[in-house]
Image (cartoon, rainbow, N blue to C red):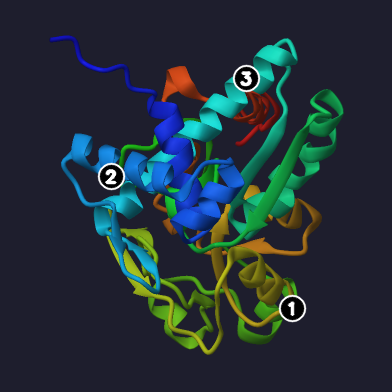
Amino acid sequence: MPRPEINRSAEMEVFTQVVAHAGFSAAARALRMTPSAVSKLVARLEARLDARLVNRSTRRMQLTAEGLAFHDRCQRILADIEEAEREAAAGAAPRGRVRVNASVPFGTHHLLPLVPGFLERFPEVTLDIVLSDQVIDLLEQRADVAIRVGPLRNSQLVARKLGSSAMVVVAAPAYLARHGMPGSLAALTTHNLIGFNFARSFEEWPFLEDGRIATVAACGNAQVGDGESARQLALAGVGLARLAHIHVGPDIAAGRLVPVLEALNPGDREEIHAIHASQAGRMPSRVRVFIDHLVKAIRLG
């Protein structure tokens, strides 16, 4: 016996409307369907999936865990369909919103300067940029692209490397004039080390001493939530900071900051990646051209 034809995209559209309108009757009005037809369609969907998606009551409806997961996936699939239709109608010209998350230092000094050139080239694309040193979940925050500095966690996300940058300990000349240039790790105990107040992969500063890696805890009297704040405090003479060279290179060149204990620098580098949740074959063109622009335009030493 042949199986009845199933319009999965229509089912997904009805289900997402039920969630968006918090009920079958309101969704039915929006879809110009009867409440009975909407209820039966969702019931058939649950039967086919063999999963309860919605808990119903006389006063309200609530998504189950399976319903929440299915709703999230439906939204992404329907967005992809809409994007494909827009691209086809517009001759595949990239358009739409690209949500971007980047760290404060990288965003300030490397990402934002590239925005005018990108938007001039792709005027139909809207960039929605959030700068934060907190590591976000792309799916939860609905970000399209995130710029990650440092080691990547194991995940199903796709990454494209933008480059890498050496780490360096720096201080302002005024600070060193007051406290002296440290000549050894032991001397760091008399200095103020600017730390971070959020969880990081490395909570201590590594140094190469006698051919071995030794670490020093950054436990000064100033802690910050992002690298740009650490840079600003270092420039103000508050203490020593350990930052990527891409962040403080211009300050070093201008003499505003001075490298410290470079003879003990272990030579570690922070890698910078653009990560996204799209599968390679299904990446929206607006996201693809943005990442391509980053790869071509960003030059990291």
In this picture, is 216 found above or below 84?
Answer: below
Q: Quadrant of the N terminus?
A: top left
Query: Which residue type does callout 3 highlight?
Result: Glu
Query: What percent of the width, then of the height, locates residue 27?
Result: 52, 51
> Disc number at residue 43?
2
* Distance from Cα at disc 3 to Cα at disc 2: 29 Å
Q: Quadrant of the C terminus?
A: top right
Residue 152 seen in render: no
Query: Which residue type does callout 1 highlight?
Result: Ala
Name the residue: 74% across, 57% down: 251
Are there few (<14), some (14-19), or many (20+) residues within 10 Å of tag 1? Answer: some
Lateral position of residue 285 relative to residue 254, left or right = left
- Which of the two discs, 3 and 2, sits closer to the camera? 2
Toward the viewer: 124 or 109?
124
Residue placed under numbered mark 3 in the picture: 85
Query: Closer to the N terminus: mark 3 or mark 2?
Result: 2
Query: What percent of the width, then of the height, locates residue 19?
Result: 46, 54
SS state under label 2: helix
Name the residue: 20% across, 15% down: 3
Are there few (<14), some (14-19), or many (20+) residues within 10 Å of tag 2? Answer: some
Lateral position of residue 259 relative to residue 278, left or right = right
Query: Which residue type does callout 2 highlight?
Result: Ala
In this picture, is 129 found above or below 285?
Answer: below
- Circles 2 and 1: CB atoms closer than 8 Å: no
Query: What percent of the width, then of the height, locates residue 75?
Result: 47, 41
Residue placed under numbered mark 1 in the picture: 236
* Distance from Cα at disc 1 to Cα at disc 3: 53 Å
- Quadrant of the image occupied by residue 152: top left
In this picture, is 154 found above or below 158?
Answer: below
